[in-house]
Image (spheres, coloured by chain):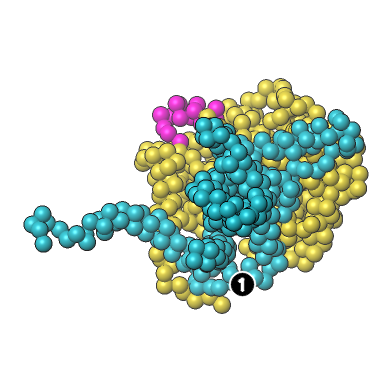
Chain colours: A yellow, B cyan
Amino acid sequence: MTVRNPLSSLKSRLGAACAAVALLAAGGAQAADLNALIWCDHSDPALLQPFEEANNVKVNVKEFEGTGAGLAIVDQSQPGDWDVMVIDSIDVPRGVEKGLFEPLPEDKLPFADLFPEVKMDKSTVVDGKRYGITEKFGYNTIGFNKTKVDPADMQSLASLTSDKYKGKIAIYDYYLPVIGMAALAIGKKTADLTEADLPALKAELLKMKANAKLVGEVTASQTALATGEVDVLVGGGEWVTAGLAKENPALDFSIPKEGAVLWSQSLAMFKDSKNKDMALKFIQYILSPEGQARLATSSCYWGMPSNKKAALTDEQKKILRFDEQPGFLARAQAYPAPNADLDKKMQDMWTEMLQAQ
Amino acid sequence: MSGSGGSPRALPWALVTPALAWTLLFFVLPFVAMGLSSLTAHEGGGFTLTNYSQFFTDPSYWRAMVNSLQVTAIVTVISIALAYPFAWILAEQVPERWQRLALMLAVLPFWTSYVVRSYSWLLVLAQNGVINRALTGIGLIAEPLQLANTRFATVTGFVHFFVMLLTLTIFANLKQLSPSYRKAAADLGAGPVRTFLHVVLPLTLPGIMVGAFLTFVLCIGDYITPQILGGNNELLMPQLVMMQIGRRGDFPLASALSIILMAVVTVAYLACARWLKIERA
């Protein structure tokens, strides 16, 4: 049971003050600046500088990981502090429900050029209005070193729990995609997961954990695969292997027969933005062929551009396996999209998995 | 009073006011805000105790505290066992003119970044790292040992850091010890071992306890070392706190876990302070 906390207003004011300080620390924000809540791939100067120079604007960025953390930053900010936000495509409705986002003008964005499978209309369109546009996507699947494992084994998720790869596996430390992979492994659709599925998912996760040497965030899991500490990365994909292709061409990824989890990130514009014209220009730039190529090959992580016309070189397309995308997309399933209650239970299940010995 | 103006009592207050203001602004107020946050529901914002009850009812949560206490205890004991002889050699065996240089060399690792040092250990302990290569090279093992991404790795990283800290506190204590204590013990017929056990060691216990307490506080609240070296194969309390913030933006639950962690540190402090007081009596 909950009752109104009389001191909650003090807490929210302190939170707002902290967010204001964070915003200023992000780069001395001014009214003419563009303030963007982003993932690390957008902080690459190679991506931002051309836009800043072309529009004579400073893009102040604040990185975050996970929609929950991003929305918490917004909660602690003042309306108008932020102009654009990168968000998991499946989470766009969460921002819309909070009344945060502005509908996007479809006629001013290159929707016709996007891969149809990643438009994600079920998530990005709410009540007939489009609030998000997919800018980049990829797969949480099996990343591996093809000189250390049998590539044929990597065509089945069952290999992840087989004794053959015991101690040779790392698990990417992000609960939603790996839970999605566990769902695929037990024959469940990621979109249909309910609380009743949690025991079976937990059992599958524990089997994966028993085989794993480590559970690591982006850098740790990438390093483990690249240095040979492990041979297989559960939840890996082109976002791990593509960026390392030049240094380590033995790294590869597969889309197993059970399928893979499609990750997709969108750009959204804030309803209270004080700089909507510039925000739209930024979104247009990111979705342009040049912006898409830069975003796809960002120094933080690579991923597939959502725009089929991205100005990638042939070599970059080969690394990203651009031409194989229709087949990959046909077998991919979306991130699990739990409601707040199921999300909490999934996170607790993930914590249990981490603590399991 | 003199006509120079101002009460003599005002000067100490004037001197202490900046420190008080600093503490109020950057410790007391944030602590109060954290306390209030810990009593607030993540969804809805009303008053609730569920953030605390979750810790005590969910085994995977209090397991993090058990892990933290175990790791901290192991690190503290090993660090003391390594640091004491090291400090004793520095203080007693190294000639006076070389002591400063020796001490500087002993704390040299302090000069490198904490993160860099942790990642360096990862490279040393990795499957293809220095230790496994050396052991396989001389034929002691056939297959590489799993050293990285384990509790062993976390403890190793911590011990490397805290041995330096404890060496400093124990060395300072040993240097303050008057030679006349040892001379008196010798006059009374005590040999070197009895003198050490019954005179030197008890008199240096305050230095050990100060170092041990600092080790405890810094170790139990550290996020970087277990995150880099532990491989998330078990969670410690700081990692659990960060998970709440990074994943869900659940500041209330993170605040409650932090308050619980602070309570444990407070208990440790009270235990140490009481013990030290007895020793001084």
Residue positioned 80% across, 52% down in the render? A209
Q: Chain of mark 1?
A: B
Question: Farthest residue toward the top?
Answer: A314
Is any part of residue A34 visible from this angle?
no
Q: Magenta span has A56?
A: yes
Can residue B76 be found in the magenta stretch?
Answer: no
**A4 is higher (above) or lower (below) than A297:** below
> Which residue is more in the foreground, A109 or A233?
A233
Percent coordinates x, y for residue B130 in the rendering: 76, 32
The residue type indicated by label 1 comes to: Ser
Residue B114 quadrant: top right
Dominant SS of magenta comes to helix
Give the extent of the magenta segment.
Answer: A46-59
Viewer-side residue, B242 vs A116: B242
In front of the other: A351 or B6? B6
Residue B222 appearing in the image: yes
Q: Is residue A340 above or below residue B145?
A: below
The residue located at (62%, 28%) in the rendering is A293
Q: Position of residue A64 (x, y in %)?
A: 55, 46
**How would you rate the neighbour count of disc 1 (Cα within 10 Å): few for under 14, some for 14-19, many for 20 or more?**
few
Q: Which residue is mark 1?
A: B53
State the quadrant of the N terminus of chain B: bottom left
Give how far across and how far down residue A202 sits, in percent: 79, 60
